[in-house]
Image (tube, rainbow, N blue to C red):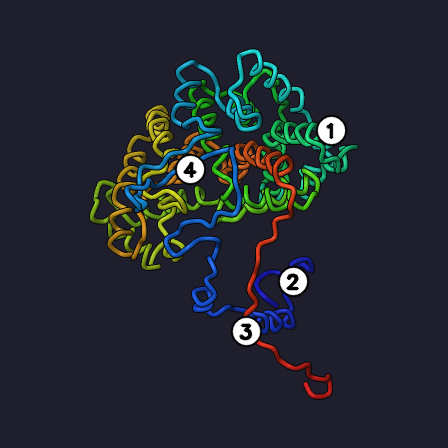
Amino acid sequence: MAGNRKNNPYSMITTEIERLAELSVGNYGINPQYYEKYNVKRGLRDVSGKGVVSGLTEISTIISSETVGSVDVPCKGKLAYRGIDIKDLVNGFYNEGRFGFEETTYLLLFGELPTMTQLETFKRTLGFYRSLPTGFVRDVIMKAPSGDMMNTLARSVLTLYSYDSAADDISIPNVLRQCLQLIALFPLLSVYGYQAYKHYHDKESLFIHQPDPELSTAENILRLLRPDMSYTPFEARVLDMALVLHAEHGGGNNSSFTTHVITSSGTDTYSVIAGALGSLKGPRHGGANIKVVRMMDDLKKHVADASDEEAIDAYLTGLLNKQGFDKSGLIYGMGHAVYSLSDPRAEIFKSFVEQLSEEKGAKEEFELYSRVERIAPKVIARERRIYKGVSANVDFYSGFVYSLLGLPQELFTPIFAIARISGWSAHRLEELIGGGKIIRPGYTSVAEDRPYVPMTKR
């Protein structure tokens, strides 16, 4: 038997399974040279990291380069929601004293900024839907609580199918209703799932607070999570900013592409969103900020003086050479599949992170993050062959912010999902309205022909 699973039949790995696994490994594995031979864009990206264009979208725009003459030249990253620069959007609602996530969600879904009347009506709609079916917390969330909140969230989403009498209706009004309900319910499903797990597994007190329909999504997250339901206005605004910056990021990111692919099959909304959650759960997509926090904790253990830049350089070099932390060869939070010179989300977020660190008495830790942000690209350029620039991405700071807000690491990725459900919903509607064909990319088989061998001769 393997590990400590021998007493649990649901996770038991027998010696026969181990043998079959070895057989599987021996019969899988494409020769890397075949990708070049057959001109296959591995991971739907070319050797320089540029993505294969497989769809069109009006929901968001990502710019990382500009054409000078006939050559693509890296530029500072730009992100626009429905054509509106993210920096202008953020400055607009922040300077006018509003929470921005609901306004951003409206923009993503309907393509226009709401008037004040439209925004208030939209917020009331979300408040109306921010209520779970009777007994759902007791019968679903409290049963078999999982240590992984993304698993809990996906299970809850799939179970909501059973409570919807029009679950399979993919007409646009019905899908919009389903999406709005899920946008409203994600904070409850995430926080309640966490509270249930902490109660049953860690024997902590159980808090199930009711949401306030008059509050923003960010305020409700903090209200639901904290035992005394209290928070400062700035805490809520920073969390709101995080939700806005994570709400959408083009149709090509893994979970949004998953949303398009599954939607194109004609299936129901709950199955689509559960699939997107499964994608986001992966550490290569939604779990990066947790890795950043743990990496920084490890750095502090190995670098005695946080101001010693040579020691930080040596630590980061060790990471790239698979000699430190998780030996993955990665500096988490550095680099992005699209951006090179800068991630506009990280640039926006950094100023709020600095203010929050001052409020929380964590100025020195913020300065350490800033040093790593400055030193890491130099280390990567020195140690790696890279085709584009490297800069901090939004995940580099988001985990730090969530820690300062007292959010448990178990909720880091669900917070991402609470934000990104807005983008997923917009992409689902876009695919239903403008798609029409099932998404089915081509795969080239490189298996060689061989004869069938009768049982007696094997």
Residue 423, x across and y down, in percent: 54, 34
Label 2 sits on residue: 12
Name which residue type carries label 2: Met
10 Å neighbourhood of mark 1: few (<14), some, or many (≥20)?
few
As drawn, the residue found furthest toward the bottom would be 457
Q: Which mark is residue 133?
A: 1
Residue 188, x across and y down, in percent: 62, 30
Q: Nearer the viewer, residue 443 or 91?
A: 443
As drawn, the residue found furthest toward the front would be 69
Q: Which residue is rendered at x = 41% and y = 18% of the image?
A: 92
Q: Do the residues labelled 4 and 1 touch (CB within 8 Å)?
A: no
- Of the numbered discs 4 and 2, the one sitting upstream in the chain is 2
Q: Mark 4 or mark 3, which is nearer to you? A: 4
10 Å neighbourhood of mark 2: few (<14), some, or many (≥20)?
some
The answer to whether 55 is drawn above or below residue 405 in the figure is below
- Of the numbered discs 3 and 1, the one sitting upstream in the chain is 3
- Of the numbered discs 1 and 2, the one sitting upstream in the chain is 2
Q: Are marks 3 and 1 in contact (CB under 8 Å)?
A: no
